[in-house]
Amino acid sequence: MNEFIGSDYLFEVQIVIFALTNPMALTNIYSLYRTMEEENVLLSFKGIVTSDLLTTVLSIMENKMHTMQESPKKQKKVFNVLVECLQNLYHHVDHDLAASNESRELLERRSAIILIVKENEHFLIRTGNYIDNGKVRDLNERLNKINSLEKDELKNYYQTSLNSSTVSSKGTAGLGMIDIARKSGNKLDFEFLKVNEEASFFCLNVKID
Amino acid sequence: MENLQMISSAKTPEVLFDAENGKLLLKGRSIPENSIEFYKPLYDWVDSYAGQPKSETTIEVMLEYFNTSSSKCLLDLFKKLERMNGDASSVAVHWYYEEDDEDMAEAGEDYQAIIKLPFKMIEINEI
């Protein structure tokens, strides 16, 4: 059950048309579909994360969880964590630049991937996005610090950060990752894959019991 | 002084700040990408209300969801009310959460730990 959303629908249509004229690619898209089916992917998206996309993804997931008759408690947890994960991706993108005419390579640098998976009784939110190599060290340190804290320490850390943080002009308060770790109740599973001299691909896996 | 009234949207809560009765209500979800834009008029209203407040002021927070961008803005709103609290008006926070929503109850405790205002935690069936 994959859903292609918004402007990227057109992009997907182009892939399908391309696939129809190329037997190799046709097989590829089926195997991509099978992989997603086998991995229990509820929803997937690849492209630039916009405000409208967030609204749509959240609304689809709310309806899906309702249909799946998940407990209200779990629905709330997944929704909360999803909001923070998606908004992390959203804020990562420089929207003024994304809107302008640019090379394919630069546009790709601003695109991200989102997979929402239901595995047995838990949900997995998996995201991936490019990050400047210069920012990897700081983020890596922050995430390791968060992972080193137990439940009560995380609560204190959140309160201290909340009280001392300021909201940037983009609206970020630097609390997202702490909140994700706290609400999911699990350690953050993450990795940085070096792509080239400028960028790495940041993979984040959040498990919600 | 005029009331501040805003209807809810997919990402922002219903707002009803009633100057006549000293009741400030936030209800629904607060998950905008950039919450500063949304909270600015609320701050402005509280600043002018603080000049001539009712003897009792209650803020009723009935949120189903809020994001971390909003959490900082909520803190700033509480801080304004904390400064106003005293001789001119006694301010109280009514923090509502749905039954079983431990995260929302804990979020109330987070603010309670930071803000010196009386908090009343109220569990309800559905927001």
Image (cartoon, rainbow, N blue to C red):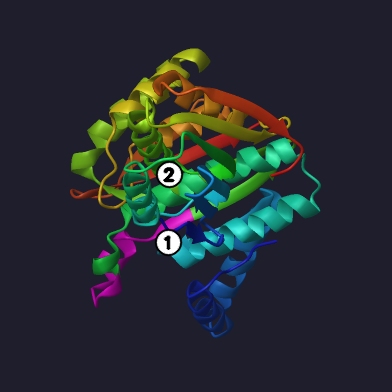
Task: Give percent across and percent down for residue B59.
Answer: 52, 38
Secondary structure under the numbered disc 2 in the rendered image: helix
How far across and down, in percent of the image, does residue B66 sit?
51, 43
Q: Is residue B13 visible?
A: no
**With B87 as the anchor, is A81 left or right in this view?**
right
From this view, report whether residue B39 is shown above or below residue B60.
below
Query: What residue do we see at 54% from left, 73% from top?
Result: A25
Q: Which corner quadrant holds the N terminus of chain B? A: bottom left
Number of other residues with Cα within 10 Å of mark 2, as a class: few under 14, some 14 to 19, many 20 or more: many
Three-letter amino acid code at disc 1? Answer: Val
Q: Gap between marks 1 and 2, in whole Å?
A: 20 Å
Question: What are the residue bounds of the magenta stretch?
Answer: A99-113
- B102 relative position to A18: left or right: right
Name the residue located 27 percent from the left edge and 60 percent from the top edge: A94
* Above or below A184: residue A6: below
Mark 2: amino acid: Ser
Residue B12 seen in the current view: yes
Q: Chain of mark 1?
A: A
CA neighbours of label 1 inside 10 A, class few (<14), some (14 to 19), many (20+): many
Q: Count the numbered circles shown.
A: 2
Q: Using the image, tell me which numbered label, if any, was put on residue B70.
A: 2
Residue located beneath label 1 in the image:
A49
